[in-house]
Amino acid sequence: MTSTPVKVTLAPFWKRLFAWIYDLLGALGIFILALTIGQIFLYLVTLPWVEDFSQVSNETSHSVLWAFYLFSAVQYYYIWCWVKGGQTVGMKAWRLQLYKVDGSLLNWKEAYIRSLASVGGLANLWCLIDKEKRGWHDLIFDTRVVELPKDYYKNKRDSKPLL
């Protein structure tokens, strides 16, 4: 079964902004989950040797490794979403999808570098200047954030976008 291309438009800045705000809630949830799992793990590992866990908790809150662990957990949310479907939860709510120019999704390496280059979403400000509405992170891999048609999910399409 061959799929026909879907006519899409480039996503406007305001939709990207609202999707980013929506995604902050998901990222906060991932952060809290990672924090909780990490604290439980540390508690169980240090239980035989430490009487006061608040001391361990205080020490880890100042650790670079702990910060890296929490950052990585949140970053993985974005990477996984972009690789598996081209959409985060916020992007899906606003009918946005991330594609490379050839219509394919990012691979793991590209999604990782894109997430770092996004500088926490600040790279999207560049799309206010760029004629093709691309952020800095879109320029690296020649990706586009497109707005899907309103009936896209209703028709259950699995096809590549056509700008």
Image (tube, rainbow, N blue to C red):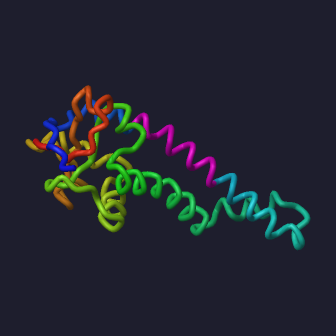
- Residue found 57% across the figure and 49% down from its top: 31
- Residue found 31% across the figure and 36% down from its top: 156
| 32 is within the stretch colored magenta | yes
Give how far across and how far down residue 38 sits, in percent. Answer: 68, 60
In which quadrant of the rendered image does the C terminus lie?
top left
Which residue is farthest top? Answer: 150
| 37 is within the stretch colored magenta | no
Give how far across and how far down residue 123 sits, in percent. Answer: 27, 49
- Residue found 79% across the figure and 70% down from its top: 45
Q: Is residue 152 above or below residue 88?
A: above
The front one of 96 and 73 is 96
The front one of 4 and 91 is 4
Would residue 58 be found to the left or right of residue 162 on screen?
Answer: right
Which residue is farthest bottom? Answer: 49
Would residue 93 be found to the left or right of residue 55 on screen?
Answer: left
The rendered magenta stretch, by its main secondary structure, is classed as: helix
Give how far across and how far down residue 49 sits, in percent. Answer: 88, 73
Give how far across and how far down residue 19 sits, in percent. Answer: 36, 35
Which residue is farthest left? Answer: 131
Would residue 152 be found to the left or right of residue 39 on screen?
Answer: left
Q: Is residue 44 above or below residue 147?
A: below
* Picture quadrant of residue 142: bottom left
The front one of 27 and 120 is 27
Q: Is residue 145 above or below residue 45?
A: above
Magenta segment, which residues? 21-34
